[in-house]
Image (spheres, rainbow, N blue to C red):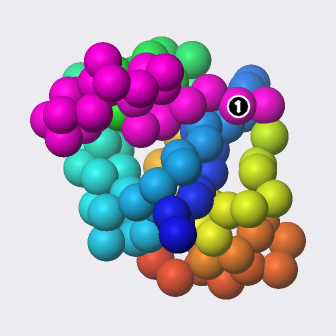
Amino acid sequence: MSTRSTVIIKDTYETLYFYRHSDGYPEHTGEDLEEFVKGYTRGEMRRSAQQSAGWLIIRGCEEYKKDGIAGQSWKVGAYEPTSAISADCEFVYLIDLVEGRLKIIAGNMISGRVVNELKF
């Protein structure tokens, strides 16, 4: 069974959601997002949810290309835009651009527990 997760990118004005159908566990998605948020400290991305969203989608597409999945699936990549947190997610990843933190939450946003937190 796939490990599903939701990625949230939040700034002062907006909150955007992305669904990940598989490999949503911290050893894969968590490590990928830890690398992703380094782009803020290196000045490669602005702390804007909208602009970050584009880079996250590209990153997911590149992952599918590397894994040989791109072009064989109806999905554009590993991170799909969605309208909310999916009920079947085992992990939630919150990228808070205001606080400069990546939080990895096991379970849901209400009763889940933070299993890792990275300041960027």
- Identity of the residue furthest to the right in this view: 110
- Seen from the viewer's position, the closer of residues 40 and 58 is 58
- Seen from the viewer's position, the closer of residues 90 and 115 is 90
- Compared to 116, does 24 lie above or below? above
Residue 91 falls left or right of residue 85? left
> Residue at the location (30% across, 42% down)?
36
Q: Quadrant of residue 107?
A: bottom right
- Identity of the residue furthest to the front in this view: 72
> Residue at the location (55% across, 31% down)?
80
Q: Secondary structure at mark 1?
A: strand
**Residue tagged by mark 1?**
82
Residue 13 in percent (x, y) is at 74, 24
Instruction: Look at the image and say whether residue 68 sits in the magenta stretch.
Output: yes
Q: Main secondary structure of the magenta part?
A: loop
Residue 68 in percent (x, y) is at 18, 34
Residue 26 in percent (x, y) is at 40, 70
Asked whether residue 41 is in view, the answer is: no
Q: How many marks?
A: 1
Q: Quadrant of residue 14?
A: top right
- Compared to 86, does 59 lie above or below? above
- Seen from the viewer's position, the closer of residues 8 and 43 is 8
Asked whether residue 44 is in view, the answer is: yes
Instruction: Look at the image and say whether residue 21 sits in the magenta stretch.
Output: no
Q: What residue span does the magenta drawing correspond to?
A: 61-83
Residue 102 in percent (x, y) is at 48, 58
Disc 1: CA contacts within 10 A as few (<14), some (14-19) or many (>=20)? some
Residue 54 falls left or right of residue 43? right
- Compared to 95, does 39 lie above or below? above
Q: Amino acid at mark 1?
A: Thr
> Residue at the location (34% across, 44% down)?
37
> Residue at the location (31% across, 72% down)?
27
